[in-house]
Structure formats: C-alpha cells, structure tokens
Image (cartoon, grey):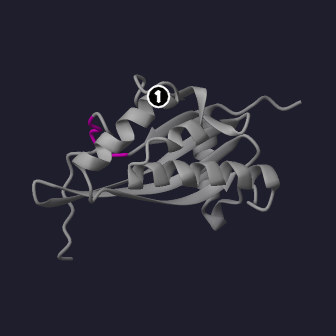
C-alpha cells in the first residue's frame, strides 16, 4: 500500500503535473468524485467573487481550516468575511484553472486581481483543497514572491502598460 502524499508533495505533483513535459500523471476530471470536488472549489471561488457568504455553508465542512489563514476555521468565518471582503474590494476577482483533481484533492492555479488606492494589483498562486464528506475540509495556498496580508493581498503593483 502506498503512503498518502503530504500536501507539499501534492502541490508539487499537481504543479509539475500540469506541464505536459513533466511526465507526471494528474487525474482526469471525468471521474465523478474528481468532478464533485471541482464543483465545490468552483462554488468556493464564486463566493469570494460575489460576496455571497452563505455559500460557505454549502461548500465548507464544519472542520474547515485554511492553513494560510489559521484564524479562518469552519464555515462561519468565511460566511462573515466574504461579504465584508467583497464590500471593501468590489472590483476584486479571482480566476482559476483546475490543474488536477482526484477523489480527495483539487489543485488550482489562481489569479487574484483588484485595485488598491487607484493601482492595479495582481497575484498568482496555487491552492490545494482537500475534500471530505462532500465538502471542502482543508485549504493550502501558496503565492510565491509575495508578502501576504490578512486577506492574501500582496504589496505588488501590476504594470498594465506593457
């Protein structure tokens, strides 16, 4: 029996596996379990783009923890934060691409864009979601080369001219 991969190893597997030249295998989405997890993650990102905090009750397990934001535990925290975040940053948008999924994990590459003090800010990263019991149980996020603030916004400007 194979030992389960650590979240770090899964990040690397999905991140490297998304590149065809890597030779790594990443589960195809037609698997029913993989697609169910992918739907949860899509809905999760919609929650942040729309500010509909009640979506947290649909997609997050009561034991949910965001390891990048350890004070975000359970659906209640996200239910409260999402509408306040959207109100404070109405132009913020999270786009994502699912790069790998299986019955237990969904890996995405995502980009977050917003305007702060009249300047465009953009950050790209990777997020890994663990699915259990039909809900998101854990999340790990990684945004290389940025200093993350409380809500994950970097102090990095985007040059739109070039």
Instruction: Quickly name the residue at label 1.
Output: 76
Give residue 31's position: percent from left, percent from top: 81, 56
Highlighted magenta segment, given as a residue range? 144-149
| Residue located 51% across and 31% down the image | 75
- Decide whether the magenta segment is chiefly helix, strand or loop: loop
User: Dot 1: few (<14), some (14–19), or many (≥20) neighbours within 10 Å?
Assistant: some
Give residue 22's position: percent from left, percent from top: 65, 60
Position of residue 28 in the picture relative to residue 43 (left or right): right
Q: Split into 4 quadrants, where in the image is the N terminus?
A: top right
Give residue 23's position: percent from left, percent from top: 71, 60
* Relative height, residue 129 to residue 33 (above, below): above
Residue 64, image quadrant: top right
- The answer to whether residue 25 is visible is no
Q: Split into 4 quadrants, where in the image is the C terminus?
A: bottom left
Residue 134, image quadrant: top right
Depth check, front residue: 84 or 92: 84
Question: Secondary structure beneath disc 1?
Answer: helix
């Amino acid at each position: 029996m194979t030992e389960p991969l650590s979240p770090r190893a899964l990040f690397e597997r999905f991140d490297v596996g998304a590149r065809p030249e890597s030779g790594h295998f990443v589960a195809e989405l037609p698997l029913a379990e993989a697609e169910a997890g992918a739907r949860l993650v899509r809905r999760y990102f919609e929650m942040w783009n729309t500010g509909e905090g009640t979506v947290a009750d649909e997609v997050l397990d009561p034991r949910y923890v965001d390891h990048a934001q350890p004070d975000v535990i359970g659906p209640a925290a996200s239910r409260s934060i999402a509408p306040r975040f959207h109100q404070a940053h109405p132009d913020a948008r999270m786009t994502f691409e699912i790069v790998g999924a299986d019955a237990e994990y969904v890996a995405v590459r995502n980009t977050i864009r917003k305007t702060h003090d009249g300047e465009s800010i953009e950050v790209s990263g990777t997020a890994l979601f663990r699915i259990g019991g039909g809900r998101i149980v854990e999340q790990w996020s990684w945004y290389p080369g940025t200093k993350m603030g409380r809500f994950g916004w970097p102090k990095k400007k985007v040059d739109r001219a070039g």
